[in-house]
Amino acid sequence: MFIFAYFLKALADVFHIVLNTYMFIVIARAILSWVSPDPYNPIVRFLYNVTEPVLYRIRRLLPFDTGGIDFTPMILILVIIFLDRFMVPILYTMAAYMGGV
């Protein structure tokens, strides 16, 4: 059973890294929205392609018009922080109860 415990611990570590990396990508996307970047730049295209599907879903769920200010990156960052603070400790706790430290 300790093998599954170590698997859960490794899964928690990877999940934490993925969430933090995606949060920094969303922050970079938000900073790029303040300037006028070249839309054909590969980095800009990568940032938009990775974040736009999630941000679009959040924009559809928002019931109000913000008057030109896009709050969806902030909402997405809050969701990422919530998942990081909620799911990662659960996985660590499950691994600890299974006997893996």
Image: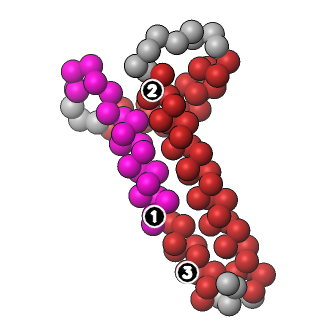
Q: Are marks 2 and 3 in contact (CB under 8 Å)?
A: no
The answer to whether residue 21 is left or right of residue 33 is right
Picture quadrant of residue 63 = top left
Image point (63%, 10%), residue name: 40
Whole-percent x and y of residue 62? 29, 36
Q: Label 2 sits on what residue type?
A: Ile
What crowding class fits label 3: few (fewer than 14 Cα within 10 Å), some (14-19), or many (20 or more)? some
Residue interval drawn in magenta: 65-86
Q: Which mark is residue 93?
A: 3
Separation of marks 1 and 3 at Cα, in angstroms = 13 Å
Depicted 21 relative to depicted 48: above or below: below
Q: Label 3 sits on what residue type?
A: Thr
Q: Label 1 sits on what residue type?
A: Arg
Separation of marks 2 and 3 at Cα, in angstroms = 36 Å
Disc 3 element: helix
Q: Which residue is mark 2?
A: 31
Image point (67%, 73%), residue name: 8
Q: Nearer the viewer, residue 59 or 94?
A: 94
What crowding class fits label 1: few (fewer than 14 Cα within 10 Å), some (14-19), or many (20 or more)? few
Disc 1 element: helix
Q: Nearer the viewer, residue 84 or 60?
A: 84
The answer to whether residue 72 is left or right of residue 63 is right
Q: Which residue is mark 1?
A: 85
Q: Quadrant of the N terminus?
A: bottom right
Q: Earlier in the sequence, mark 1 or mark 3?
A: 1
Picture quadrant of residue 17 = bottom right
Disc 2 element: helix
Q: Of all residues shown, which one is farthest toward the right?
A: 3
Q: Earlier in the sequence, mark 2 or mark 1?
A: 2
